Amino acid sequence: MNENGNTRMLGVAAAAGLAGVVATGLVAGWERFWINWIVWFLFVLMVGLGCLFIVALEHVVGATWSVPLRRVPERLSGLALLMAPAALLALLSLPVLYPWTKPESLKDPVIAGKAVWLNMPFFSARVVACVGLWILAYRIFVSGSIRQDRDKDPRFNVRARRFAPVFMIIFGITITVVAFDWISSLEPLWYSDVLGIYIFAGTFLAGLAATMLAVLYLMKRGRLPGVKPDHIYNLGGFLFAFIVFWSYIGFAQYMLMWYANLPEEVFWYKARLQGPWGPLILLLAVLHFLVPFFVLIPRSAKSRPKRLFWVAVLMLVAHWLDLYWMIFPVLRQGLLFSWPELSFGVFFISAGLLWIRRAMTGGADMPVGDPFLREGLEFRL
Amino acid sequence: MSNQAFSVLGLFDNAQSLLDAIPSVKSKVSARLDAYTPYPVHGMEDALGLRKSPVGGMVFVMGLIGAIAAIAFELWTEGVDYPLVTAGKPVLSWEAFIPIMFEVTVLFACFTSGLGMLFLLNRLPLFRHPMLRSKSMPLITKDKFALAVEADGQPLDVDAITALLRKAGAQAIEVVEQPAPPDPISPSLLLKVAAVIGISCLVAGYVTYWGVKLFPLSIPVVHMLDQPRVDPQRESSFFKNGTAMRMPVAGTVARGHLPFTVPSQEEAAALANPLPRTDDVLKKGRQAFATYCSVCHGILGNGVPTLTSVYGAKPANLASQQIRDYQDGKIYYVIMMGKNAMPSYAADLSEDERWSVVHYVRVLQRALNAKDEDVRKETLK
Amino acid sequence: MKTETIALPEILKTAPITEGKVSIGSLDDQVLAHVEIKPPLVWFVAFAITSSVMLIGMALIGYTIATGIGVWGNNIPVAWAFDIINFVFWVGIGHAGTLISAILLLFRARWRNAISRFAEAMTIFAVMCAGLFPLIHVGRPWVAFWLFPYPNQRGIWPNFRSPLIWDVFAVSTYFSVSLLFWYLGLIPDFASLRDRTKGKIRKFLYAMLSVGWRGAASHWRHFERAYLIIAGLATGLVLSVHSVVSFDFAVSLVPGWHMTIFPPYFVAGAIFAGFAMVVIVLVVVRVTMRLENLITMYHLEVMNKIILTCACIMGYSYLMEAFTAWYSMNDYIHHTFKQYVAGTYWWAGWTTITCNILIPQLLWVRRFRRNYFTMIFVALAVTVGMWFERFVIIVSSLHQDYLPSSWHIYKPTLVDFGILLGSFGLFFTMVLLFARVLPVIATTEMKTVLPGTRPRHRGGEHE
């Protein structure tokens, strides 16, 4: 299969998916449409933000082993910006899915008390502010890095290193806002303060998995000369570590709510464990933790491209499952999975891959202007 | 010759020269090669052709055993052997057992790693190895690097090896003598001792478990029972009359028992029965009568009781003319204060119960002196 | 396209691990010498002070055990106070050591080698201090062995569902694994000492402790693998042990305690407090033992950056707690959080916020990160602030929870303060002893990161 053939195939798939997406709204109902939109919009956003976080992390720590790989997450972080219009479109879902937009919900004193935070104008302002901050970070990290390809000015590194810690704070707050606004407020009576960290863990993992896939893809085509299994080993190590971290946070949130058994918290889990959702969360635990954990334990596994490829794919599937499991039970209609979900999947995956392919053409595949590139390529375990 | 060489050492000044020397020596000798360095040198394993360490596999297996043993033990003790219900949680609450399972897994894995490495793989402690008495050892632990050609069964051609080492760049040569007699405390002895201790612990635990279950010979700790406080029904030297229990203060009124200040039965005639003559009241009266009064006065109230032989005294016939002529208040007075041999039943009956007994006595009196018009027409036929 | 190359700005240049000329031979002479010579007068004076404080603390503990917990300020509802605050405080301080020696090993941060030995030692001593408190606060310490699962005539097992038992397992695992890890790292150093020392008794002792280590490459490969694996497992321990400690509070219903963010928040706080203690001790060690060329300003600066990072994470956590407390619209949680900053113990709440979030912001300035006075000031503020944070969480939440009829003020007694000070005495006494008896820098590990010691690898792929 040559490149053009692939592109054509993806284009056809994207078009077919889009037809299915539109049909979902018209045929299956707008609730179904919007809930799928929210899940996929968050999925792609988290991949993009995760990649932006990876770039910022590399600058904060001043790591050199990752410099040859850095262009990959830089390009992928554009997905977060792509989601800006998707987020604005998603604002239309608020009256359909989010109970606090309905005036009669204010009869409940709990929701009425939160109304100063959960109201359309403030919500929209928060979305715009977050997107604005992400665009700012993108310009500093990514546009600056691409510019450095040409002018080879090491002052970009200084600027990036100075801004990176500030971005960490911005990232922490914006990802928490995303978690509380888009996911937690679907059930406005519920609250959990670790949700921001939980979504952060998922975001970082999604970014790592996407980066891993893109790096392996480029390595196979010889577009990253000098990048060795040693580099991949480090990336694999991070993947392993954050699989454990995500599982730890997920388990901690569940176990604490299970243990105290407070009705005002535990109803959220009850809806997500009963009926068909019980086996689904078991599947999530197996796919998101057990399988990748045991597959990646051996030292050799973390530098084998084939194994890492499949683990990264699994992580992205598991990430979608995580969002599906958190969001779909809101409808209280049982396990909804048929042509609407599949069309959304086909559309977003093919359109996403098309966009990524385009983003990866043009310009250098490595930050050739970075003064630490040579040191990074010489990295050995 | 009694002193055959154990090994020939070639000393080098730095790690690089040692590493460079190895291929030329390795290709020309059939004896075993080992290197002695002050710190672990990167790439030494590959240069010497040493097999990869199996520590990882050992740790994985033992970690898994630890995890399964921990969770099985927890589920058995809390769910099967002595089920404990805490805070209404199900007895097989796996969520609450995960933290300990994790800790025990890490414990097993770490100790396997550390002690397995020392005892099993490195065969340490070993205090009489010939290297430890060589002149080069202090140099090696400080800053020199040695390549050792060791005789494993076959005698070494010391001169040839010396020449080979010098040619490869050794700064100095030392010939290490034949080993001393084996250590009395060898790692295998330590392992055997550890195994014996471990197995005896398990056996002792099993035996103790069944022993204390089947033969509970020792008195459980009763510290909480044995306290310096006064218990009911016991003596106490603190009070003058020697009893721990005290009488209520004079004039104490029990709950539900108002003071009864009528001085005599004649004056009690003025009391009116406050309760109406309803079915409920009569039923209550019947029950109270059967419980307290019928033992002496008989179930029909006619003075034919079941206990005369014990008491000797003759209880009153409640259906007699004298008592039929009593006012309600006089009957009440007798219940309250007793009469002749009859004690007061004020403590046994509440006020309501006493008045309902009075009603019931009237019923009995009418029943025992029934006239035709008291009986229903159907019964007469 | 510009043809001129712009020079690399100073700030991007990687700092050297050591300053001046350090060879693997001179390293041994510099570091191991301290073990061989008599300590200076300053050491004896410090030891006298710390051991006296420790003995006073021990005496007060004896008094507590003989008389009962009533000599402390604990009451109903504040049934847990200084005892658990000190426990959480010391366990937290231990975590920095494991982070430095284990997690930074996994990240291959070469600067860690100069400070890992000391940090691990501090972990062990801190965990020892921590373990003291659960033991003495149980009221009947002579039956504390009931916490362990053994077949007994009562027929009952410990309640494995209780986070207090999880604590027993977690802290004892953490202590034994840290001890093992520390000892393994010491084996090659004991071998060096065995080969250098002249005294016969010392030689015998070091020979025993080094279990006949001879630096064979065939041994090193197993050693390195085992060490790396334990480092990886210890990383999991760092996360889990303080999370289990946080579970003590988070599984309950007490408003202000049942917040799901407690596990990662406590871990971040532990690392925060631990690094502050490490900075304080290392500055003293660096100056008094003249190790400035090995424990460089770069090391201190990086540790201060980590302290700053943790301060930001703590700030995030406090923000999240406050926001979620408001967002929950739960009157009891609202009341509790108001109490934190405006209630009986408002001064503790404000001390916490000032010391943990505001003062460490000084470390954004590079000059302050590299100045002894500012960094010790910040580190002391963090230590105090983290102790008060636990005070706020525990005492302030407990003294006014659901039922107003149960509300009661808590006042610590002199015995409480004495035991707290005694624990500091114990910690610093052990640190002083360690500095004189064992090599404070892991010389063997340090040798691997000195310039020129790592050979160029010839070809071949890794695994």
Image: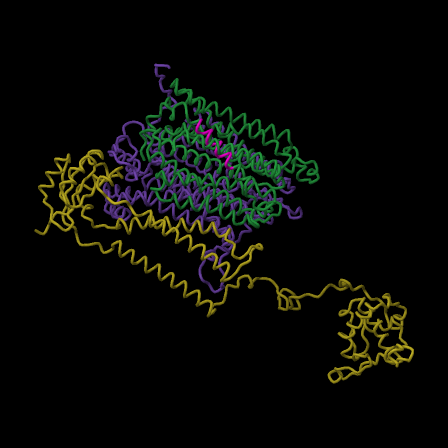
Q: Residue furthest right?
A: B373
Q: Is residue C301 visible?
A: no
Magenta stretch bounds: A345-358
Q: Main secondary structure of the magenta part?
A: helix
Q: Tell me residue B272's x, y (percent).
A: 88, 67
The answer to which of A239 and C83 lies nearer the viewer is A239
| B336 sits left or right of C114 in the view | right
| C190 sits left or right of A213 in the view | left
Residue C395 location, quadrant: top right
Q: Which chain is green?
A: A
Q: Tell me residue A93's x, y (percent).
A: 61, 34
Q: Is residue A225 above or below residue C241?
A: above
Q: Is residue B268 above or below residue A326?
A: below
Q: Is residue B267 above or below residue C256?
A: below
Which image quadrant: the N terminus of chain C? top left
| A156 sits left or right of B136 in the view | right
Instruction: Give the mark count.
Output: 0
Q: Is residue C403 above or below residue C291?
A: below
| B344 sits left or right of C326 in the view | right
Q: Tell me residue C338's x, y (percent).
A: 62, 37
Q: Is residue B87 visible?
A: yes
Q: Tell me residue A40's x, y (percent).
A: 53, 35
- Is the image coloured rainbow, by chain, by secondary structure, or in one colour? by chain
The colour one sees for chain B in the rendered image is yellow
Is residue A346 found inside the magenta-colored segment of the image?
Answer: yes
Is residue A223 found inside the magenta-colored segment of the image?
Answer: no
The answer to which of A250 and B237 lies nearer the viewer is A250
Q: Which chain is purple?
A: C
Q: Residue furthest left?
A: B1
